[in-house]
Image: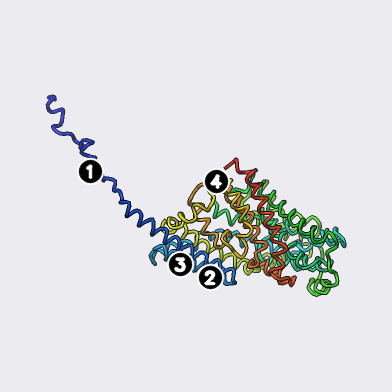
Amino acid sequence: MHPFHARAPWPRQPLPVVQDLFLKKRPTSKSPAKRGREATMDVGTGIALLVAFLAVVVLIIRGQSPIIMLLILAVLWSAIAGIGIDDIQKKILQAGGVAYASAVIIIVFGAWFAQVLIQTGIAESVIRSAVELAGDRPLVTAMTITLVTALLFTSMYGVGAAIAIGIIALPIMLGQGIPPYVAAPAFTMGIGAGTFINLVQFGTFQKLFPDLKYEAPYLTYWIAGMCVYILAAWLLEFIYLRNGGVRRLSSIDIAKADEPAVRRRTPYYTYIVPIFPVLMIMILKWEIIPTFLVSIVLALVLTGRDRTFQGSINLFNKTFSDAFPDIATMAALWTICGMIIVAGQTPEVANALKPLFGPVLPHTPLQAAIFFGLLGGIGSIYRGPLVVIGTGAALLAIVLANKDIPIPYLYSIWLAPTILQGSMDPTNSWTLWTIGQTKVSHGDFLRTALPFGCLMVAVNSLICYLMLGSLS
């Protein structure tokens, strides 16, 4: 071919200069005035969102339904941020409502296993045997009930489980003259301590904190956190009961009136069942739902000597049905909080809130330890702004969007305030039931319990940073 024909008379592609001038879009720069107006609008929207957030917190504290208030907050935030009604119903209410549906299923299986432990008599047998070892010594009895309750609630879950154990444990303490304002937190703090490694707690929150695993080194800290909470409860009991701070005559009538009839004890080998699910996951690395199924069958088999095979089948079905009333409120809260988290992660809401919350929320493991250590206790009572399954879902959405703190560390450092809310917040179902059962006022309960709860949060925040901060 002739050299003349080998070259095109004009380049097939425009020259780079031509591309830059004509084919590429030039970066458009906003004027300082326009940027200032947009920043002002974002700040204004953020303030409106913050006001709505605080209003909902106040209304919940004053006794309004958390479910209704949080649903209103999800819709209100979306509307204030300028999200259209079509996106609100599709992306916030629909997609957010089903985002954490699998967490509700985990809660169902945990409540089901708790009902099996209750209706087979295993839970009652464990706690009565432990109290008998304590004898007629109020301080030792209170400490024993806290410890045994913690061990039971490493796998049990739900308000029904708490009531079933409470109607046994509380009359025993009151019958030995332990004041109601001490008996109540001795029981609820035991529930909270067990929840540190509770499988349902882990399985549900795993949906909010992706890549979370039930294994060391984080599991090691959760076990340490459980021990710290037990020690905090024991310290409370020691301070109030060390000098014989009991009122036997004032409480014995209540105890006799409320204590249920004693059932036949289950064999001692059944006492392994409450912690069997935890051992299966730690040792065999099973998943949560199969673990609960195997544990349910094991409990029925080990206690089946007084039942026919059909009787065990009937009990299997009955305990499943009985589990649902226990989890109704939690299922609703998880559904609504899914909407809040999805709303908080939308660009419209997140961009408006970041300028306000950015300087306040932690961005490093050390900042997180200080933040939760100082504010985790007070900020969790009455479903305050640090309660993840509550108004804290909004803060969680912002912290997750920042991607500054590794998720397993964030869950671990947030765990102690979450546990405190579940064991001391008077709006929490089993805490409210315990307060009513012991006839102690909300104020007396919090004055007795909350200082030790805040101490637990502070100590665990320090331990979490020392154990896990360098891994983050």
CA–CA distance between discs 2 and 1?
54 Å
Q: Can residue 448 be seen in this snapshot?
A: yes
Asked if residue 28 lies left or right of residue 422, the reply is left
Q: Which residue is mark 2?
A: 68
Q: Secondary structure at mark 1?
A: helix
Q: N-terminal of the two: label 2 or label 1? A: 1
Could you say which is closer to the camera, residue 375 or residue 82? 375
- Percent coordinates x, y for residue 169 in the rendering: 77, 65
Identify the residue shown where x is 47% and y is 56%. 356
Residue located at (79% from left, 55% from top): 269
Dot 4 alpha-carbon crowd within 10 angstroms: few under 14, some 14 to 19, many 20 or more: some
**Which residue is labeled 3 in the image?**
76
> In this image, 334 relative to 49: left or right?
right
Query: Going from the N terminus, do you reach mark 3 or mark 1 first?
Result: 1
User: Mark 1 sits on what residue?
Assistant: 23
Query: Which mark, residue 364?
Result: 4
The quarter of the rendered structure image containing the N terminus is: top left
Q: Is residue 51 above or below residue 456?
A: below
> Does residue 219 show up?
no
Which circle, 2 or 4, is nearer the viewer?
Answer: 4
Q: Residues within 10 Å of mark 2 (few under 14, many from 20)?
A: some
The residues bearing labels 2 and 3 have C-alpha atoms spaced at a distance of: 12 Å
Q: Amino acid at mark 1?
A: Leu
Residue 246: quarter of image: bottom right
Q: How is the image coloured?
A: rainbow
The residue type indicated by label 4 comes to Thr
Dot 4: element: loop
Q: CA distance from mark 3 to mark 1?
A: 44 Å
Q: Amino acid at mark 2?
A: Ile
Residue type, label 3: Leu
Nearest to the eye among marks 3 and 1: give it: 3
